[in-house]
Amino acid sequence: MELINGKTFWPTTFTSHPHYPVLQENLSCDCLIIGGGMGGALSAKLLTDQGIDTVVIDKRDIGYGSSMANTGLLQYTNDKRLTSCIQTFGEERGVRFYELCRDAMQHLEKISSKLEIDPWFVPRTSLYCASHEEDVPLLEEEYRNLKHYGFDVELWDQEEISAVFPFSKRAALYTSGDAEVNPFRLVHSLFHSASRQGARVYAHSELTHCDYDENGALCYTPDGTVRAKHVIFSTGYETQEIKKDRGAYLQSTYAIATKPLQDLSSWHKRSLIWETERPYLYMRTTPDGRILAGGLDENRPREEQRAIKAVHKGEILLQKIAEYFPLPDLEVDYAWEAVFGSTHDGLPLIGPHPDYPNSYFVEGYGGNGTVYSMIAASLIVDAITGKQNPDMNLFSLTRTSKPSPVQPTT
Ligand SMILES: Cc1cc2nc3c(=O)[nH]c(=O)nc-3n(C[C@H](O)[C@H](O)[C@H](O)COP(=O)(O)OP(=O)(O)OC[C@H]3O[C@@H](n4cnc5c(N)ncnc54)[C@H](O)[C@@H]3O)c2cc1C
């Protein structure tokens, strides 16, 4: 699957990144990770922190899957609002999901602060804007629920928003505890650290086949094999080519990076900005003074249309930025289109699957894929090290969700 089309920004920020060899021998290990993106990187880091003998293979160069298209917004709030999570999954599971996201944010910050290669992790606040008047009650209800369950949130009115930003919206949620990151650098930094801790990492080594037995699996690449007690499939959206999940679907999304701008002082605290409209628009800034924006998700265009769409949608994203920040020097520098996976019920897919013995899947589908990858890595490492963690059931690959009435809050 061609995951990305167009010109991505992040690889230009780390041209001297490490390169890894092709697997050309027969190895054995405790855990084989298939996939050298964010999910694989966080899993490799946590496994090697625990001293687990780990091998990683990727069919591309490390970090060149969807993680290179990621715009790097890290948030504890999700595309699916807490209120909606409670409606779909019930109070206990809905709130637990949000708590896990908040904990994962703190975990990401802790890990990032200790890495040798700087992943450009910067704590940020978020502004979640009501796109239309009719969305205001939704935000008010969400505010009450977030507050009620102990999350850090403020409800801003039009006056509060236009006092610190050059645009006006009827209402917005203002949250703390979020962050921005350079996902390409973070992936490389994590693998660099995991390698130092003993992980054996291989690029351009595609998994072609796995044979399972009671001791684990024997996994084949074109020029070598890996015998592993456990296998982690962290193959991103291409997992849908290995094992189709009924609960998942793939679309296209778009993103741009502008040229560096003279003056971003009107951008209050360089917050992460997004909105209630679907498909949505989201924006952030970069340390070198650019604006990154993304969204406009839609059904996947035909292959031959992808490049032209990346440019066209890039222009639309630029116009949308200008509606928020009418800056004189706004210009697209990088524009890309990419495959984007979501789930119908809004939760990622994480854990074992009955058809794949001794294996776990990391499918961090949804706008918060990095946070979900963090949750997945923690849960799977718990499982591999023999710790029972009931939170894994929330993300079961074979789950069915039963709606339950939302609990009223005052
Ligand atoms: C445009 C865009 C913007 C996004 N913005 C955000 C954001 O702001 N914040 C956020 O949290 N998330 C965001 N995401 C989501 C985020 O990018 C993903 O959740 C994340 O990158 C997924 O990481 P991954 O490791 O699962 O997948 P990938 O990075 O795709 O890694 C999977 C790897 O598996 C390898 N692989 C696949 N099959 C095989 C095989 N058979 N053998 C060997 N290797 C194989 C691939 O080569 C690939 O490198 C965005 C996504 C897109 C497309």
Image: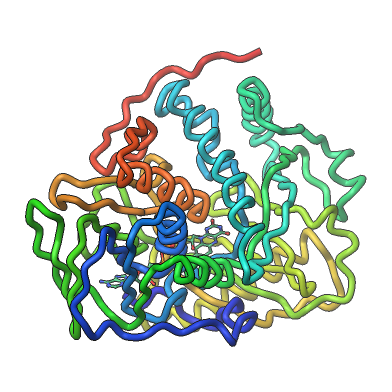
The quadrant of the picture occupied by the N terminus is bottom left
Horizontal side, residue 290 vs residue 340: left or right:
right
Classify 91 as above or below 198.
Answer: above
Q: Residue at x 78, y 44 (%)?
A: 169
The answer to whether residue 365 of the structure is visible from this angle is no
Horizontal side, residue 358 vs residue 375: left or right:
left
Residue 333 on image: x %, y %: 68, 82
Horizontal side, residue 267 vs residue 144: left or right:
right
Image quarter for ligand 1: bottom left
Residue 298 on image: x %, y %: 45, 61
Identify the image quadrant of residue 387.
top left
Identify the image quadrant of residue 103.
top right
Classify 347 as above or below 10.
Answer: above
Colouring:
rainbow
Residue 336 on image: x %, y %: 54, 76
Q: Residue at x 21, y 62 (%)?
A: 228
The quadrant of the picture occupied by the C terminus is top right
The answer to whether residue 21 of the structure is visible from this angle is yes
Q: Nearer the viewer, residue 381 or 408?
A: 381
Residue 192 on image: x %, y %: 51, 72
Identify the image quadrant of residue 160.
top right
Classify 210 as above or below 23.
Answer: above
Q: Nearer the viewer, residue 352 or 132?
A: 352
